[in-house]
Image (cartoon, grey):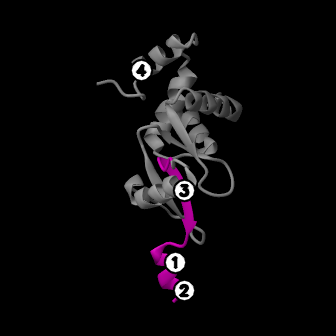
Amino acid sequence: METAGEPKALRKTLHERGMRMTPQRQMVLDAVRSLGHATPEQVCRHVQVGAPTVNITTIYRTLDLLDQLGLVRHTHLGHGAPSYSVQEHEHVHLVCHRCGRVDEVPCALLGPLGGTLDAEYGFELDASHLALSGTCRDCLKESS
């Protein structure tokens, strides 16, 4: 089975939309897959290891394109640049205000909240790449 990170899958997706495959596009997608979650700056540093002439503008444009194509997703984990990951990587992020730690939990944990939002407000929650802010257990232990 082919995944979004394989060159054939990206080439096919781009071709279906009348776009061409470039080495930079594949390198950016490969970097996101390799890093798991990454800001554009982290992706840029990763890509520049093998292609030093690729600049941050190319990274931002490529991440935006890959997001529009549904090959990556972005999440705002706090202040600053969004974090990108591959689409099938769906979970809720728990972001600690104090230390910056990011934990991942299953979307199913928000099922009851989704049911309440739907029943009371007619709102369908998409928890498939959500960030919640708070304080992690280690920081809570330190403060007590």
Q: Which residue is depicted at the point 54% across and 86% down?
A: 143
Amino acid tagged 1: Cys
Which label was assigned to residue 143? 2
Q: Classify mark 1: helix, strand or loop.
A: helix
Three-letter code for the amino acid on which mark 3 is drawn: Ala
Q: Which mark is residue 139?
A: 1
Residue plotted at (50% across, 36% down): 31
Q: Quadrant of the N terminus?
A: top left
Tell whether label 1 touches label 2 (CB within 8 Å).
Answer: yes
Report how far apart the C-alphas of labels 1 and 4 lie in the structure.
42 Å
Q: Residues within 10 Å of mark 1 (few under 14, many from 20)?
A: some
Q: Secondary structure at mark 2?
A: helix
Q: Is residue 95 at all visible to an observer of this figure?
A: yes
Residue annotated with mark 3: 131
How many discs appear?
A: 4
User: In the rendered structure, does residue 132 fall within the stretch colored magenta?
Assistant: yes
Question: Hey, which residue is sitting farthest bottom in the picture?
Answer: 144
